[in-house]
Image (spheres, coloured by chain):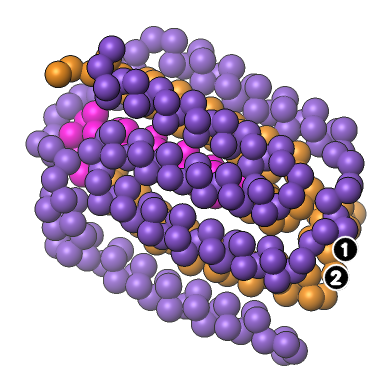
Chain colours: A purple, B orange
Amino acid sequence: MNVHDILFWVFSIVMLACGALVIFSRNPVTSAMFLILLFFFMAGLFVLLEAFFLAAIQVLVYAGAVMVLFLFVIMLLNIKASERRKFNVLAVIGGLGVAVAFVWELAVVLRRPVQSLTTGAGEFQGGLQDVVRPLFTKYMLPFEVTALLLLVSMIGVVLLSKKDLR
Amino acid sequence: MTSAITLNDYLAISGLLFALGIAGVIIRRNVLVIYMALEMNLNAANLALVAFSKFNKLPEGQILVFFIIAIAAAEVAVGLAIIVALFRRNQTVSVDDLKTMRL
């Protein structure tokens, strides 16, 4: 067992523990903090998968921008009264049931190695150039459409945030 | 130095995180926490895509994850604006109190 394997198990187990704490902590601010931690460990897994660019983007965009937005809204709304509410028994049973069914299905599928999925046919070695160059050649149109989508969502947010919606 | 971690291990971790996200969406009553659980689901899918990209030696998985992260950022901004508008109108973030569309 080398360093790579040990780091994989440490990152994975701590990440799943953070995920459980996001769901089961009472205070939304605590949930948000554990979600930030989860994003950092996910970035660690991306580094192990040699996706260094995505690890940096994960930390910058998710742990930086998105979670700051989340914390800002949580503190803006100042939700304290709704914390005391009990869990809905039916929802807890349903949620755990769906999760257990999903994990069971996953265990059945992953029991055997998915040979047919790993052809290993490509030439990609994990370099930054090989990831970024197709963005400006082969996938130019989706890239530009994403830029347009960001503009549209920005206009939508400004409209939604106006005091009197007409 | 060869690693003993296979694609199956990454897919199992990704699936477990996705199951946690689904459970969170169904169990929790707070709209903001439901939204965080949805973000967890997106990240689980990202992990599976990056793992496929690594083990198939194709860059397309990482490019798709790049687009998912960009779109998730836009989606979070719009979703949180809707939540703020909802709170301004109803003074609550609990999905139990938001039942005007229930039959």
Mark 2 element type: helix
Which amino acid is tagged 2? Answer: Asn
- The residue at 18%/56% (across/down) is A132
**Where does label 1 land, which residue?**
B100
> Can the viewer see residue B79?
no
Residue under numbered circle 2: B90
Q: Name the spot of residue A144 as percent of width and height, x first.
A: 29, 71
- Which quadrant would the N terminus of chain B be assigned to in this image? top left
In the image, residue B68 above or below residue A147:
above
Image quadrant in which you'd find residue A61: bottom left
Residue A19 image point, x, y percent? 58, 37
Marked residue chain, label 2: B
Rendering coords of residue A128 (x, y %): 16, 51
Q: Which residues are magenta?
A: B36-59
Q: Amino acid at mark 1?
A: Thr
Q: Residue at x 88, y 48 (%)?
A: A84
* Circle nearer the viewer, 1 or 2: 2
Of residues A2 and B49, the one drawn nearer to the viewer in this rendering: A2
Q: Is residue A19 left or right of residue B4?
A: right
